[in-house]
Image: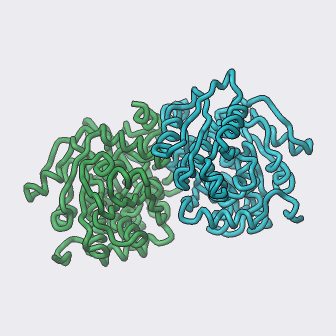
Chain colours: A cyan, B green
Amino acid sequence: MSTASLPIDFADVAAAAERLRGVAHRTPVRTSRTVDERSGATVYFKCENFQRMGAFKFRGAYNALARLTPGQRRMGVIAYSSGNHAQAVALSARLLQVPSVIVMPHDAPASKLAATRAYQSGMPGSEVVLYDRYSEDREAIGRRIAEERGMTLIPPFDHADVMAGQGTAALELIEDVGALDALLVCVGGGGLVSGCAVAAFARSPGATVWGVEPEAGNDVQQSLARGEIVRIETPQTIADGAQTQACGRLTFPVMRALVKGVLTVSDAQLVGTMRFFAERMKMVVEPTGCLAAAALIEGVIDLRGQRVGVIVSGGNVDLPRYAQLLQS
Amino acid sequence: MSTASLPIDFADVAAAAERLRGVAHRTPVRTSRTVDERSGATVYFKCENFQRMGAFKFRGAYNALARLTPGQRRMGVIAYSSGNHAQAVALSARLLQVPSVIVMPHDAPASKLAATRAYQSGMPGSEVVLYDRYSEDREAIGRRIAEERGMTLIPPFDHADVMAGQGTAALELIEDVGALDALLVCVGGGGLVSGCAVAAFARSPGATVWGVEPEAGNDVQQSLARGEIVRIETPQTIADGAQTQACGRLTFPVMRALVKGVLTVSDAQLVGTMRFFAERMKMVVEPTGCLAAAALIEGVIDLRGQRVGVIVSGGNVDLPRYAQLLQS
């Protein structure tokens, strides 16, 4: 098999790693004797909850912004997101001194609004544009502003530079712990898993890559089964970073070529895993960040005897919400 | 100044580090741009909440048990503690195949009882002995069992091997990040701060070592001021690992010689710091583990322009309690 026909290849991931050097955190890899005992596997957690702005999304956003031409940088970038991608673009824009417009729902968590605005403060031409998620179309708003202001739209996953940037998480993991037998990665639009699969295919070719989706929204599982992109209703799940309706036109062929299959976990399994991380590993992990680990810890897949990498994708969850989930 | 007259010196810490190699985790050192910006310092957090059994206590307990003679190991060890020391001794005993008796209050958190018993399971001669903390004297119970069964008592802090073991936390920190200008360490009985001060004095002699106590129980601050050990009522504070009434006869002279001073922080400042760790650094830190960081983050001390080490001592807090503190 070759990756030559895919939208990104390993050279793109390696180039992204160079751009991110000294800018993104090289996040720690952690282990847990309890997880190893329960799963029978040797498990390495790549802790992207300790990444800058709290999630892997920084990798892709920064890589995409770093690739812009001087003219594009001058005009600025725009992103629409209620979650980690918004903050990732705002922070990357600040670091590269690029104006940014972030389109967010008017009922986004106050902490995310505040964090995004803090990254934009003192950056001329930067602002948060609020929209009503029940009556307005954020993509239309994004496109209109992009056209009016000549800004470059940075999509959350369906973009070669974003995908390549996300792949650096798996690249670092494999560099740090050596070849893997399996790699578990959460799946929303497929940006992270496709980048990671490309990295693993090049640097740990024996590794089987598994995606993990919320049970309520298994569009990628369905898409891989049918051989075409399946679009679903917005899934009702606590994994708010994986509430995508469909994967991307660039991520789909990569997943089809390099991802062995997609597993699903329930919200209850996510909460159990979130509690495990807090109680035993002393880490705050957001629900979406628990997806990949839940598949293993909750026994959805049996990887006994294998060396398994697990991407812990992020840790951004409002404290009151987090406290509520720990108690529920 | 020389450490020759003190109960431990650097050779003891270095020997402890050898014993702990491959047994204790070499815990990660983490940084936070937000903390650096707020404090004006360059701050390195030594994350002992990621240590085995969730706290630095494993270092001292394992070091002490590893130093026992074969005869002492055969007879077993005893410890009284409602907290991390109990689990540290139980786990160390298991690893070294030594019987252990842990004397715990009958109203200790169920999770701590369960964890201690789990470490003891399958170890002949091991058990948890419960006592009524309102009517019984745990020290008397401990002494009686030690005599009856010929077991060695492992005190939580006032023991040279325990102190030397705890000092390996600071030794690793300095090895990883280089010389420091200041080191902040929580103070209960003084085992951690005295071991760390000895390590810093040898490996980063320019570093000023500060202890941090809860406002409600500043016995060490008083003791250093008076030049003799001051005994106080059991302090009412959420920092349950620092509810000591007096420091030790071995820890006191070390603190007197090597600790510049003791700062205090309030419970409200501990909660603020606990929230900061959860929200910004995605780490679960127990109240006692927040002491040292709180002094810096809450502005109790100004260390602008300095390279500062902060020991995050542990992460063991019951989830319902933790959730409550995050919300309060």
Tell which residue pokes out farthest to the left in this image: B226
Viewer-nearest residue: B215 or A12: A12
Answer left or right for B286 relative to A127. left
Q: How far from the left and from the top, in percent, is residue B233?
A: 17, 41
- Image quadrant where residue B17 sits: bottom left
Q: Position of residue A20 (x, y in %)?
A: 60, 62
Identify whether A316 is placed above or below A24: above
Assign the N terminus of chain B to one quadrant of the image.
bottom left
Left or right, A254 with respect to A67, comes to: right
Q: Residue at x 90, y 43 (%)?
A: A228
Q: Position of residue A270 (x, y in %)?
A: 64, 39
Instruction: Looking at the picture, tell me which residue is in the foreground, B127 or A291.
Output: A291
Residue farthest top in this picture:
A135
Location of residue A303 (image quadrant): bottom right
Q: How many numbered markers are drawn? A: 0
Name the side, left or right, on which A88 lies relative to A220: left
Residue A211 pos. (x, y %): 76, 49
Q: Quadrant of the C terminus of chain B?
A: top left
Q: Is residue B309 above or below residue B205?
A: above
Q: Nearer the viewer, residue B155 or B228?
A: B228
Report whether A287 appears left or right of B304.
right
Say whether residue A37 is visible. Answer: no
Q: Nearer the viewer, residue B306 or A7?
A: A7
Looking at the image, can residue A90 be seen?
yes
- Residue under the point 16% across and 63% down: B256
Residue at horizontal 52%, vertical 30%? A324
What residue is rendered at 71% in x and 58% in y?
Answer: A164
